[in-house]
Amino acid sequence: MEKRIFITQKMIDQYGVLNGDNDIIHYDIDYARQRGYKDTLAHGPMVMGYAAELAARKYGRDWHRRGEIEVKFIAPTYPNEELVVSIDDGGNVVAKVGETVNVVGTARLR
C-alpha cells in the first residue's frame, strides 16, 4: 500500500502551528541553508504521520488501540517534493523522494 504526498511549505507551516514546533529551520530558508540544507525541512513527525496513516489503513481499528510505529529518519524531506510512503505486508514502512530513502521503520500491533 502506498501514498503519494506533494509536500508544500504551507503544509509544513500548518503542521508547525498544530504541533507547536516553531523551530526556525522549518520556516526560514536562509537559516536552513546556513545549516547545510537546500531548503526548509518538513517536520519529522509530519512525515511519520503519513506512515502511521497507512498503518491505520492496514491494521484497521486495532491500530488505534494496539498500534506502534518505530522509524529512523535517514534524509530530510523538503517542500516542493513528492514523498512516496509505503507499507508492506510485514509492516515495513519506507518514505522516499525519488530514489532517496528519507524514513524507514516498522508498524505493528502490540
Image (cartoon, rainbow, N blue to C red):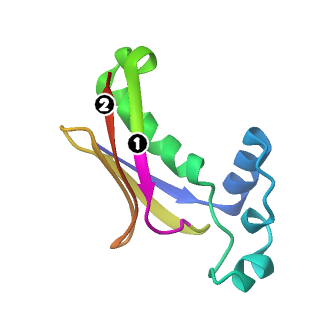
Which picture quadrant has residue 55?
A: top left
Q: Is residue 58 above or below residue 20?
A: above
Q: How many neighbours does mark 2 have within 10 angstroms: few (below 14), some (14-19), or many (20 or more)?
A: some
Q: Is residue 26 above or below residue 87?
A: below
Q: How many neighbours does mark 1 have within 10 angstroms: few (below 14), some (14-19), or many (20 or more)?
A: few
- Residue 91 horizontal side relative to residue 67, left or right: left
* Residue in view at x 67 percent, y 52 percent: 11
Q: Earlier in the sequence, mark 1 or mark 2?
A: 1
- Residue picked out by circle 2: 108
- SS class, disc 2: strand
Which picture quadrant has residue 8?
A: bottom right
Q: Is residue 13 above or below residue 36?
A: above
- On the image, the x and y values in percent for residue 53 come to 45, 35
Q: Quadrant of the N terminus?
A: top left
Total count of labels: 2
- Residue picked out by circle 1: 70
- On the image, the x and y values in percent for residue 100 come to 37, 72
- On the image, the x and y values in percent for residue 78 come to 58, 68
Q: Nearer the viewer, residue 97 or 62?
A: 62
Which stretch is magenta?
70-77
